[in-house]
Image (spheres, grey):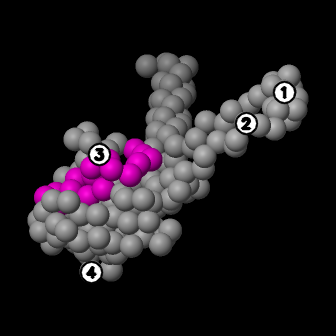
Amino acid sequence: MSELAITALRFGLLALLWIFVFSVITSQGRSLQIARPARLTRKKKDETASSVSTDTPPPPTRALATQLAITEGPLAGRTIQLGGQPLLIGRAQDAGLVLEDDYASGRHARLFPQGSRWFLEDLGSTNGTFVQGNQLTRTMAIDPGVPVRIGKTVMELKA
């Protein structure tokens, strides 16, 4: 093989390595993003029209859910007061909600508030976290009344 061919092969492998590194960084960045509510932008005409009209009430604000009710599983009937603080869910004894369940990981999932909504993220559990029967693949906003299943335990937020 010529020296030129070896040099071209080295640069090709280096380019492939950098493509791999950037794809891993991009993938991790997407998985760490938290869904944010869409911002509504109004045109100036809409802003002046809304400032003149005073008989339209402001849109209702959503109250942050305050309880997590367990509806199925070994802890069925139990209600946890959230108090606006993040909640770690799993088998570990330092979790805020300790699940005595072989299908739950030690640090299975985390429920945390952001603005007026609660978000749920799976912390790399072995058996997964399910929202309305679908496996959670990214951080997701959870509304009151939506069933969340971890192992044999089903829970939902209550306002």
| C-alpha gap between disc 4 and disc 2 | 51 Å
Question: In the image, which disc is placed on residue 131?
Answer: 3
Q: Which residue is mark 2?
A: 56
| C-alpha gap between disc 3 and disc 2 | 36 Å
**In front: mark 3 or mark 4?**
3
Spot the residue most to the front. Answer: 55
Identify the mark nearer the N-term, 4 or 1.
1
Question: In the image, which disc is placed on residue 93?
Answer: 4
Residue 152 appears in which quarter of the rendering?
bottom left
Residue 143 part of the magenta segment: yes
Q: Secondary structure at mark 2?
A: loop
- Which amino acid, mark 1? Ala
| C-alpha gap between disc 2 and disc 1 | 11 Å
Are dots 4 and 2 in contact, CB under 8 Å?
no
Identify the mark nearer the N-term, 4 or 2.
2
Say which of 152 and 81 sits in front.
81
Q: Which residue is mark 1?
A: 49
**In front: mark 3 or mark 1?**
1
The residue carrying pointer 2 sits among few (fewer than 14), some (14 to 19) or many (20 or more) residues within 10 Å by Cα, namely: few
Residue 120 part of the magenta segment: no
Q: Secondary structure at mark 3?
A: strand
- The spot of residue 49 in percent (x, y) is 84, 27
| C-alpha gap between disc 4 and disc 1 | 56 Å
Q: Judge whether 69 appears above or below 143 on screen.
A: below
- On screen, residue 1 versus residue 133, left or right, reads right
| C-alpha gap between disc 3 and disc 4 | 24 Å
Residue range in magenta is 138-156
The residue carrying pointer 1 sits among few (fewer than 14), some (14 to 19) or many (20 or more) residues within 10 Å by Cα, namely: few
